[in-house]
Image: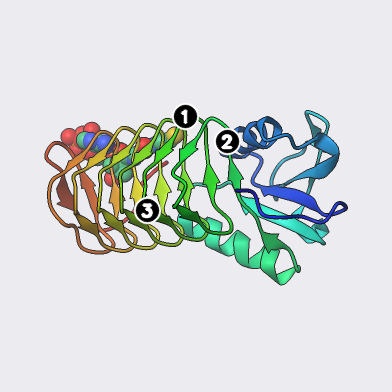
Amino acid sequence: MTATRSRSARLHIVGAGGLGRETLDAAFACGHRPSGLVLVDDHVSLTELHGVPVRRPEESADGWYVVAVADPAVRRSLSERMLGRGLIPSVVVHPTATVAHDVSVAGGCIVLANTYVATGSHVAAHTQVQYNATVGHDSVLHDYVTVLPGANVAGRVVLHGDVTVGSNACVLPGLVIGAGTYIGAGAVVTGNLPARRVAKGVPARMHPPAGGKV
Ligand SMILES: CC(C)(COP(=O)(O)OP(=O)(O)OC[C@H]1O[C@@H](n2cnc3c(N)ncnc32)[C@H](O)[C@@H]1OP(=O)(O)O)[C@@H](O)C(=O)NCCC(=O)NCCS
């Protein structure tokens, strides 16, 4: 599942916060060694973590990357910075993730431990399926979608770009969620949702405007 890399090119994990460290752990579990990894962050004072060097974005060049930041707008901005420096999107899929044989996982995606992505699904670029989350059969996750820990996206669901599904939320089968919409933790989504709204509760109700906290 991980994209092919030349021997010298290193995998850059962009973001050294909690999700960055979870992604680093997934990379170790995949067999990456510290010498093949770089953490990238604008804001940390660390120079090294678990033997992996920590660099600033402007010091990154020649390699592969994933952006380990949950906010889709920040993720997009950092991804564009990495692309601008000539890096190529890669994929990190934890070895305990179950991704069906016919699922396509595009560049930039992060799939953490104990996830399940069912047959016929498509996971588009820079999407994240975080630990213990599930995605049912024939679902489509567009670019920069974030499925937070423990969330359950049922079968035949379409999550348009930049959608976030909060921890332990549930999206019922066949629903379509508009771009940029944020589903709160623990929500049960029982109907289609338009773009750029916040929905929370059981059953989920919309609360404009869009926004939210991770
Ligand atoms: C739904 C969410 C985006 C709302 O954020 P917000 O608009 O900033 O909400 P606030 O914190 O200002 O709370 C506003 C109200 O909504 C309620 N609320 C907040 N989140 C809620 C949720 N998930 N379900 C139900 N009610 C919620 C608050 O209790 C508060 O109610 P009150 O007005 O009666 O006091 C956010 O709370 C959330 O659920 N984020 C998901 C975070 C997540 O899953 N993180 C995982 C990290 S690993």
Q: Amino acid at mark 1?
A: Asn
Q: Residue at x 88, y 53 (%)?
A: 8
Identify residue for label 3.
Answer: 121
Of pointers 2 and 3, the one earlier in the residue sequence: 2
Callout 1: SS:
loop
206 vs 157, left or right, is left
**Between disc 1 and disc 2, whose residue precedes?**
2
Question: What residue would you read off at disc 2?
Answer: 94
**Residue 208 appearing in the image:** no
Disc 1 crowd rating (10 Å Cα; few below 14, some 14-19, many 20+) is some
Task: Return the x and y of residue 125 as percentages of the image width and height.
Answer: 51, 60
Numbered circle sitting on residue 114: 1
192 relative position to 63: left or right: left
Task: Give the quadrant of residue 116.
Answer: top left
In what quadrant does ligand 1 lie? top left
Q: Residues within 10 Å of mark 2 (few under 14, many from 20)?
A: many
- Tags 1 and 2 touching, CB below 8 Å: yes
Amino acid type of the residue tagged 2 in the rendering: His
